Image (cartoon, rainbow, N blue to C red):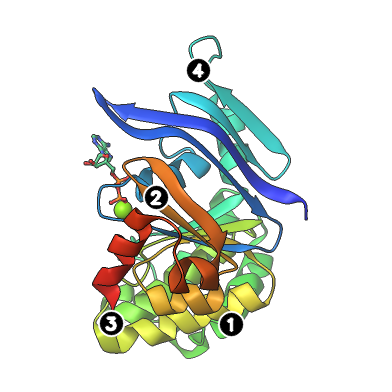
Amino acid sequence: MTAKIEVAALSKSFGDHQVLRSVNMSVGSGEVVALIGPSGSGKSTLLRCLNLLVTPDGGRVRVGGQSLDFGTSSKLPGTASLAKFRAGTGMVFQQFNLFPHKTVLGNVMEGPLTVRRMPRAEAETLARALLGKVGLAEKADQYPARLSGGQKQRVAIARALAMQPEIMLFDEATSALDPELVGEVLNVMRELAAEGMTMVIVTHEIAFAREVADRVVFLRDGVIVEDGPAKQVIDAPQQEATQAFLSHFH
Ligand code: ADP
Ligand code: MG
């Protein structure tokens, strides 16, 4: 399997707090990886390093065909190469971050129009197709304030997909939702996984990770403690720290 994402010796500190400690991870094309671990273990930081919302201190990040080295001797990438690098990944956050003054359709069209400079008619066709895919075709003309949290998050997924990324990153995409709205968002993610999208999912939905992910990576204190097939890591974790963490979910 060709690796779509490769992270080597990745490190990141905030002040004197080392949050990522020489992390090595690779994600194959079409693979779904669930990243789990205690709060503060560095999951969001690792995910953010994959699209350079956080600049690593050292190591290498390769996403698709683009690779960047970080460290004392390498200079930071320029704005153009940053933008190109970021275009390879779509990210969905816990907070939906929709534009409140734009309709649902306008939110999904925004990236294609402004970043990709797609003709309006083409952007609208794409946006409507993606809204159909996430089950919100009939909400195209609504404003975000009128939607439920689950609907907002599905719009956020459609918006990320509109940039036609090779990889989708999800950072606790269902953590801010009322329990009865979690399922509709997980269903969209499940569908994307089934279509072969390469995905890295930070989640506390352990049953979902077990079912949908190919691999589970357990991070603690900025170190990958365990990395293996999803069912194996969740049903029979090898490391004591993984066992202790997972015991909270039973
Ligand atoms: P997780 O997502 O696993 O909960 P994070 O990656 O968000 O963990 O955070 C890991 C650690 O890094 C935490 O101690 C957090 O407070 C710290 N941290 C994260 N982002 C910043 C930042 N921008 N500035 C300072 N400290 C940060
Ligand atoms: Mg986090």
Mark 3, secondary structure of its residue: helix
Q: Answer with mark 4 or mark 2, whichever residue precedes in sequence.
A: 4
Give residue 23's position: percent from left, percent from top. 48, 37
What residue sits right under mark 3 in the picture? Answer: 146
The three-letter code of the residue at mark 1 reads: Lys
Rounded to the nearest angstrom, the CA distance separating label 3 from label 2 is 37 Å
**Are the two marked residues, 4 and 2, in contact with CB atoms closer than 8 angstroms?**
no
**Residue type at numbered disc 3:** Arg
Residue at numbered disc 4: 71
Q: Picture quarter containing residue 102? A: bottom left
Mark 4 or mark 1, earlier in chain: 4
Instruction: Provide the secondary structure element on which disc 4 rests.
Output: loop
Q: Residue at x 46, y 70 (%)?
A: 236
- Please tell me which of labels 4 and 3 falls first in the chain: 4
Circles 1 and 3: CB atoms closer than 8 Å? no
Q: Which residue is mark 2?
A: 219
Residue at mark 2: C-beta within 8 A of ligand 1: yes
The residue tagged 1 is: 133
* Up/down of 31 relative to 16, above or below: below
